[in-house]
Image (cartoon, rainbow, N blue to C red):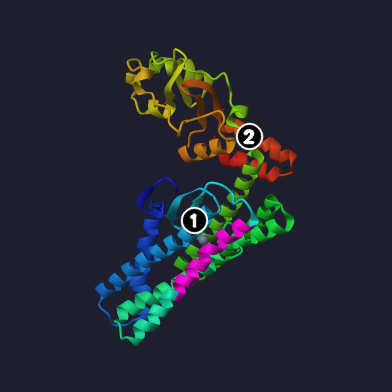
Amino acid sequence: MFQRRARLFTILGFEVKVDISWLILAVLITWTLARGLFPYYYKNLPAATYWWMGIAGTLGLFLAIVFHELSHSLVARKHGLPMKGITLFIFGGVAEMSDEPPTPKAELRMAIAGPLASIALGLFFFLIRVLGKNAGWPVTVVGVVSYLAVINFILAGFNLLPAFPLDGGRVLRAILWQWKNNIRWATRVSSRIGSGFGMLLIFLGAFRFIFGDFIGGAWMFLIGMFLRGASRMSYRQVLMRKALEGEKVARFMNDNPVTVEPSITLEELVNDYIYRHHFKMYPVVENGKVLGCVTTKQIKEISREEWANRRVGEMLEGCSNENSISPDTDAVKALTVMSKSRNSRLMVVEGDRLVGIITLKDLLGFLSVKLDLEGEEGEAAGLIGASGG
Ligand SMILES: [Zn+2]
């Protein structure tokens, strides 16, 4: 869900991206507005008018979500947290935070900024609506403005549910964190509540579905699933960050990795390396210099008859920040790179020299043992289950 994004524009230094799933949502919302909501409240308008109102309403909602996320991002930046950008996907927006907030107070301010911004925007549209109605604006304009007032209040209300990782859950976590000075405990409690809310929505959704409200029920069910998954994942992320805090890549890497020469053929690579070691990626090294890597994915794209004629050197992939990392980087960063690039093995490179390989398996092995020792057995098992390989 997080791979297919389009960049839209940059505002105040934040890149705004949209996931393809948001486009599906946008079509659904436009359709619901044009065929359901607007015809219900504003009768006897031409069909085309309802569609224009629907499009305007959806665009307004899009900007309202960007405004909400932008407020989070601005406060985060003020507290020195690097923010990568804003991505809109099917359940709203996500301000991409690359780290945990430094203090409970910072978290509280960051979390509350979004809902406050939405409430302010809702009040603004409400005011416009009152003024417009008095000034005799066309019913179409007043209709869209009323919708935008209401949807901003709904946005604020939903996000204020005390269910981590929603904003309200973050506020709750900040308060608990401040109280006991333990971010892990605070995250566990608030993410359990988040998970509970998720279950509640799943049950209510299923209930509505059974009793005939198919679309409303299905949405509720999906939002519940999303919330439940997100709350558990957020807790695991905190656990991982805490467990790997201060650890460098060098500590986990294998410093004697299997490498290949650029001159061997694909046939040799497959028979002598892949079938023997079963790795998916091999660094290509010549005279002590790392040239890049070759992966099973690349080989799959070449037809079998060609394997004997093609050499590894012709098709290697140069080192990039998707397939390599430096030994003094934080191990947490390695996990982030792995999950983003879907590479479970990264070359550890210093200058043009290969110093080792770091694998997801080794990182997760360490995490699972460490969390197990700290009494988080269930979470440790979850990590391994989520890794896939
Ligand atoms: Zn928010």
Q: Nearer the viewer, residue 161 or 291?
A: 291
Q: Position of residue 232 (x, y in %)?
A: 61, 51
Q: Is residue 287 magenta?
A: no
Please tell me whether mark 1 sits on a helix, a strand or a loop.
Answer: helix
The residue beneath circle 1 is 73
- Over which residues does the magenta segment extend? 105-123
Residue 375, by quadrant, is: top right
- Residues under labels 2 and 1: Cα distance? 28 Å
Q: Nearer the viewer, residue 235 or 331?
A: 331
Please tell me whether mark 2 sits on a helix, a strand or a loop.
Answer: loop
Image point 37% across, 83% down: which residue? 131
Image point 67% across, 51% down: which residue? 183
* Above or below, comparing residue 267 to residue 38 in the picture: above
Q: Which mark is residue 247?
A: 2
Q: Amino acid at mark 1?
A: Ser
Q: Amino acid at mark 2?
A: Glu
Q: Are there few (<14), some (14-19), or many (20+) residues within 10 Å of tag 2? A: some
